[in-house]
Image (tube, grey):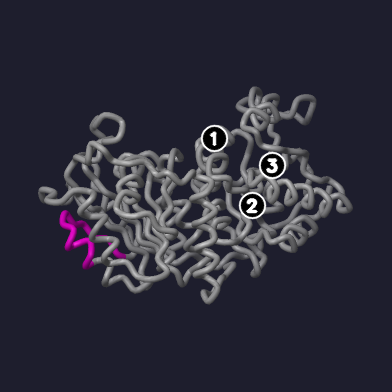
Amino acid sequence: MIGAEVFVRAARGRGFGLWTGVPCSYLKPLINYVIADPGLRYTAAVNEGDAVAIASGAALAGRRGVVMFQNSGLGNAVNPLTSLNYVFKIPVLLVVTLRGEPGGPPDEPQHALMGPVTGAMLDVLKIRWEYFPREEAEAAAALDRAVSYMDKEALPFAFVMRKDSVAPAGLRAEPDAPLTPVFSRSGLSPRKAACHSRRDMLKALRAAGRPGDAILATTGFTGRELYALGDAENQFYMVGSMGCLVSLALGIALVQPERRVIALDGDGAFLMRMGALAAVGHEKPKNLVHIVFDNGRYESTGNQATVSASVDIPAIAAACGYERVEDTVSAEGLADILRGHANNALTFVRAGIQSGTAADLPRPTITPAEAARRFAEYLKKVGRDHKLIMR
């Protein structure tokens, strides 16, 4: 058994500064210690997949991230681990608890299957792993192996934590989270007919951009249309990882708070991981602009309907703590909103759009891994004069 401070200090010395995840009783000492350390940032995620995306955003922005969760949540993280981290080659450090360990201490019945298959799942996901160090003398070497692998392969590495690996650590008093008035109303927001296409909106967005912006586009036609308007080093084209875009953007926004980060989401992706808005609204990064293009369709997969027509999307954002919430159906309206944003409020925009796209819409010729490296270099290059914070 080691003290939490031994592992955390060793990790901090190797560049790990943003910690995120979903609590497990095995992780309690580690999380409690990180929360109490003023030199580190702990970002509470609402699910394991979003935690992976948050840490991945931090990694792109130049800060190593640690993701902590119970092995029962590994399935929730499969989407980003396979289609974000593996495809884009973004390394993060995982600490996965081994609940239901075969031959280990008695545990709850829900861990009966996951315990025996945890290692095999990590193997299938092509994630190198070893057991979490249980002796203080082992921590530094274990982290060196993890960092060496992550740097060489640009892939995640996992520590699998058995029960009682870390000595108990109490939770010191946390500052009270600022209370956000609950936004409520009956019925849906009045909707005006969309008058512009996604392409029109993207053209207006690019015109209203400013130096230093980081633009991330969700999977499907959004990324492809952004690319078709002109490839650029400050643009990240998501593939897969549906619903994880705003969590990825959150990680970047937290590490580089003076840079404007624009997340271009779709209504289907927004609905898939709607809980992510709660974490974003809690953190309140004033440099983040979250735009949801809403045409009520899964357009890139055959134009099937989403359920967005029965959801008051702006009200959800407001209820989750976004400070500025806008609803527009025009390209000019979107441009005005962006021109008026001065990194002074966490902003949400529902942008109603018409369906339809060009029949010959190109796909990016740059590979995802190349795009991620270029984007990270852009963040590093343009961010040299930006203040990087850890809390």
Query: At label 2, which amino acid type do we have?
Result: Val
Query: At label 3, which amino acid type do we have?
Result: Ala
Q: Which residues are magenta?
A: 324-336
Q: Which mark is residue 329?
A: none
Q: What is the quadrant of residue 348 in the picture?
A: bottom left
Quadrant location of the C terminus in the rendered image: bottom right
**Left or right, 101 with reference to 216:** right
Q: Position of residue 226 (x, y in %)?
A: 32, 51
Q: Position of residue 99 (x, y in %)?
A: 68, 33
Mark 1 residue crowding within 10 angstroms, few (<14) / some (14–19) / many (20+): some
**Left or right, 32 with reference to 323:** right
Q: Which residue is mark 3?
A: 158
Asked if marks 2 and 3 touch (Cβ < 8 Å), the reply is no
Residue 330 in the magenta stretch? The answer is yes
Q: Position of residue 171 (x, y in %)?
A: 66, 59
Q: What is the quadrant of residue 37 in the picture?
A: bottom right
Residue at figure coordinates x 23%, y 64% from the top left: 335
Q: Which mark is residue 78?
A: 1
Residue 258 in the image: above or below residue 355: below
**Left or right, 60 with reference to 238:** right
- Marks counted in the figure total 3
Asked if marks 1 and 3 touch (Cβ < 8 Å), the reply is no
Mark 3 residue crowding within 10 angstroms, few (<14) / some (14–19) / many (20+): many
Q: Earlier in the sequence, mark 1 or mark 3?
A: 1
Residue at figure coordinates x 75%, y 63% from the top left: 13
Per the image, label 1 sits on a secondary structure element best described as helix
